Image (cartoon, grey):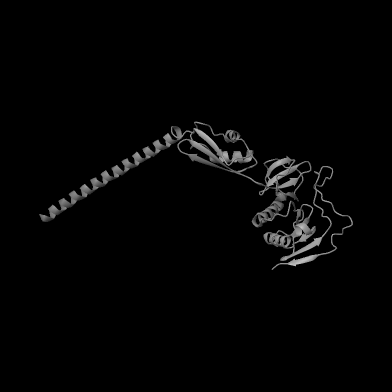
């Protein structure tokens, strides 16, 4: 008798456990359905009713009209801020405006959009004969046919004189010169080197800088440019060359700076002399051989 009672009790407990598990499973399914419904409702409301755009502002822009950028972006008032296509807007603005290098779209809840603009900076000007082409460090054409070079922007020789379209990039054939230009300009920024206003990249093994009608600076290859510029700066300042010297400063040999006096230096010019802007050529005395004397400065 006792065994039968135990069996009946065990069966009753097993049946009760199954019912509890069934109820628990049903409750879990119910909770999942409620969560899915709530999430779906929030998404629908977010993209249709709430967060409609009331204001659009632009930050970091100095080259173009804010209204023009907003119109070009295609963003509309009362449009839902979570339905705009960030990548499409960024691509459109960068392609349409040459000075825009990056665009970041910020959403400020509940109803504001901010276009954060990062502008490209010109690092050099290519002499195109009838004007100058301003280029960025990445080789993008920022402006064409500019008659006046901005202050402290060097003229760069070695690129094709054909003027590419504004907003385009210098072609692949010139990519090595773009890389050398970046190396030189990064070194100038790193060292604060001030003694140049022309960069000649025509020969990859004989990079040269020119400063007014005073210095022709020979750097040689693109290796160790920051170190070479530091050596040149030390020699110019220690020897007071700004007031006592005119000629060639040669830093193409590692650890050495040679100076060779001259009565004049020849700065590179646009290949067509009839259309080249005036003032690009400094005078050189025809009787000066350029190699009468030399001196070496060794710096450890």
Q: Residue furthest top?
A: 78
> In the orientation shown, which residue stands out farthest toward the left?
1
Image position, residue 26 (x, y; %): 29, 42
- Residue 289: give x, y in percent of width and height: 87, 59
Q: Is residue 55 visible?
A: yes
Give the residue displayed 51% in from the left and 34% down from the top. 55
Residue 289 or residue 177, whichever sits in front:
289
Residue 217 appears in the figure: no
- Residue 246: quadrant of the picture: bottom right
Residue in view at x 13 percent, y 55 percent: 3
**Image quarter (top left, top right, bottom left or bottom right) of the N terminus:** bottom left
Residue lying furthest right: 287
Residue 7 x/y as whole percent: 16, 53
What residue lies at 39% left-to-right and 39% top-to-bottom?
39
Left or right of residue 100: residue 47: left
**x, y percent for residue 293:** 83, 64
Count of picture labels: 0
Quadrant including the C terminus:
bottom right
Location of residue 195 (image quadrant): bottom right
Q: Is 293 left, or right, of 37 in this rendering?
A: right
């Amino acid at each position: 008798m006792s065994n039968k009672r135990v069996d009946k009790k065990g069966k009753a407990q097993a049946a009760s456990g199954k019912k509890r598990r069934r109820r628990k499973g049903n409750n879990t399914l119910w909770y999942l359905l409620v969560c899915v419904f709530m999430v779906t409702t929030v998404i629908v409301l977010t993209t249709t009713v709430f967060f409609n755009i009331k204001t659009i502002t632009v930050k970091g822009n100095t080259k173009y009209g804010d209204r023009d950028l907003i119109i070009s972006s295609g963003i509309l008032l009362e449009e839902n801020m979570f339905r705009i296509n960030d990548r499409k807007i960024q691509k459109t603005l960068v392609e349409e405006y040459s000075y825009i290098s990056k665009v970041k779209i910020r959403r400020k809840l509940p109803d504001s959009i901010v276009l954060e603009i990062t502008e490209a900076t010109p690092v050099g000007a290519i002499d195109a004969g009838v004007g100058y082409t301003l280029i960025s460090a990445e080789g993008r054409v920022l402006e064409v046919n500019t008659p006046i070079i901005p202050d402290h922007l060097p003229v760069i020789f070695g690129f094709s004189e054909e003027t590419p379209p504004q907003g385009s990039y210098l072609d692949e054939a010139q990519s090595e010169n773009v890389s050398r230009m970046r190396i030189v300009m990064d070194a100038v920024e790193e060292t604060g080197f001030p003694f140049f206003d022309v960069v000649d990249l025509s020969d990859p093994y004989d990079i040269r800088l020119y400063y007014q009608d005073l210095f022709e600076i020979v750097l040689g290859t693109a290796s160790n440019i920051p170190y070479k510029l530091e050596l040149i700066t030390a020699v110019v300042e220690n020897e007071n060359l700004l007031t006592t010297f005119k000629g060639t400063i040669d830093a193409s040999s590692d650890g050495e700076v040679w100076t060779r006096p001259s009565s004049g230096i020849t700065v590179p010019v646009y290949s067509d002399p009839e259309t080249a802007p005036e003032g690009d050529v400094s005078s050189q005395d025809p009787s000066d051989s350029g190699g009468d004397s030399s001196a070496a400065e060794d710096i450890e």
